[in-house]
Amino acid sequence: MAAGAKSFLADAGYGEQELDANSALMELDKGEPARARRCLRSGKLGEQCEAVVRFPRLFQKYPFPILINSAFLKLADVFRVGNNFLRLCVLKVTQQSEKHLEKILNVDEFVKRVFSVIHSNDPVARAITLRMLGSMASIIPERKNAHHSIRQSLDSHDNVEVEAAIFAAANFSAQSKDFAVGICNKISEMIQGLATPVDLKLKLIPILQHMHHDASLASSSRQLLQQLVTSYPSTKMVIVTLHTFTLLAASSLVDIPKQIQLLLQYLKNDPRKAVKRLAIQDLKLLANKTPHTWSRENIQALCESALNTPYDSLKMGMLSVLSTLSGTIAIKQYFSSAPGAAAATARSFDLVKLAQECCYHNNRGIAAHGVRILTNISASCQEKDLLPLEQDAVFGLEALLVLCSQDDSPGAQATLKITLTCMVKLVKCRPHLSQSVVESLLAQLHSAQDNARILMCHCLAAIAMQLPVLADGMLGDLMDLYKLIGQSATDKKQELLVSLATVIFVSSQKALSTEIKTVIKQQLENASNGWTAYRIARQASRMGNHDMARELYQSLLTQVASEHFYFWLNSLKEFSHAEQCLAGLQEDSYSSALSCIAEALKSYHKGIASLTVST
């Protein structure tokens, strides 16, 4: 089989020649069984394995059901008659090609060939078969013989087989309600049994995360996990149990508030940093998935823990959860004042106190989360008088901008991205702050590192698109910087030229002056390559500056090395000319409008003809 498969793969595009799918199918069916038998008798294990592991590439190249069906049936034959190493190779191929399993047409025959190995006397062979069945759970979720074999193997005395059965049980529990209901008691008995080693219990517990198919099953699993987290206080057991607890709650949805309270309790009371980190990680998961289930008390408890912790790593994790929640409906619930809740309302400012405290922290990550929380509060709670909070947000953002724009490290760039995103959001929701934000960006643009300048240009472009009234004030500074940057030809400078040109196009609002056009073309001639000029022309087309785009495409026509590229650029030039004609339509002049439309149609036809030739 494998030698034949190897021959087929070599002919199907992995060697010298390329065949289409029909040829591949014909080759696959040509004498494969005979060649496979000869190959297996030859004992050349290396060739067999090499042929098997090439199948994922074959499936990517020819993802046709008939080919995949035939290939998997032959892989199942190899699995049935081969040794354990070959079976392991087939298992890896099956796991890598999981998305193609649903294309198998003869599922019964495929499973029959694989399942025959489960009766082997070799526990390793049975273990590989169980993992194979587990990997196929998505297409055979209700196979009772597979369910029975997994239950039997959980009682095996061989550790390898038991671990494989645990893997298969987890996969089938996720896919089949009947299997989950049937196996739940068995898993519970093994976890609670005194004879079960602790390391095996740690592998069994995650299966319970899939017991969410109905309310009673989820409730019984939750009770078991509650007993475990109380009965086994060791670090590993608590971490695995709590995480399984969280995943079960996230899937069943009904117990999320209780789970949030439990995690906050461990975060506050458990002294172990590993447990606290796990609690923060799971709180972040629940904050992303179900922010509406967080009560004011939950957020307040998290704020208090963040204010009291002396560890920066834990504080950053808690701030990450709070910054996620601050951008959702949870923040409105937090600041909403309920009747008779004066004390709670006074305490609710702990979140603001925490954010203000962290804005100028010496750890960039903590400072970034602090300003993000302030920005989200200012953007979400617009009905409140939050002027001091807005100013704190602006000052914090400006401080981070100055700090990160001078640093080229990956951490500084990541923090800068958060800062600039917050600036765009703040300007969108609070337009009266836009002038000071834009002035800070323009002032810092001249002294920043090139990587930071590119990001800042993107931010300025986003602000100019939201508030066109600010665009005119940017042009002077942008043109000065464009002239300065154009004198260098490094890769980063070329990237910066494109970003600066984009901001200029946005700021000019589809009406570039002759002076600006001249400066842009002059700098492109002096220091840029053809690719940079093309990218700037493409940005001009995107931003509606079609006359500038047309001129740039025209200048590039003589710089390309093939006719295909020439006609491609010529088609873009004609399309830009047509768009410019339509942009100049005047409603009050009927004859002028007709001539513009006629000229545009003429250019469109020329562009389509050039585009056809280029392909």
Image (spheres, helix red, strand yellow):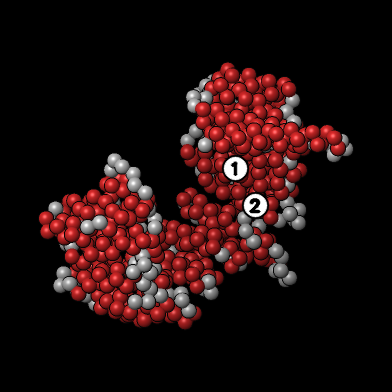
Where's residue 37, x and y in %?
A: 16, 60
Circle 2/circle 1 CB separation < 8 Å? no
Quadrant location of the N terminus in the rendered image = bottom left
Binning the other alpha carbons within 10 Å of mark 2 as few (below 14), some (14 to 19) or many (20 upward) gives many
From the image, tell me which residue sits under label 1.
419
- The structure residue drawn at horizontal position 59% and vertical position 19%, both measured from the top left corner, is 525
Regarding mark 2 in the picture, which secondary structure is present there?
Answer: helix
Residue flagged by tag 2: what amino acid is it? Asn
Residue flagged by tag 1: what amino acid is it? Thr
Regarding mark 1 in the picture, which secondary structure is present there?
Answer: helix
Where's residue 173, x and y in %?
A: 38, 73
Q: In the displayed structure, would residue 22 be above or below residue 364?
A: below
- The structure residue drawn at horizontal position 36% and vertical position 53%, both measured from the top left corner, is 22
- The structure residue drawn at horizontal position 36% and vertical position 67%, both measured from the top left corner, is 105
In front here: 503 or 433? 503
- The structure residue drawn at horizontal position 68% and vertical position 46%, both measured from the top left corner, is 426
Q: Is residue 536 visible?
A: no
From the image, tell me which residue sits under label 2.
376
Q: Report whether 294 appears left or right of 490.
A: right
Q: Residue furthest right?
A: 588
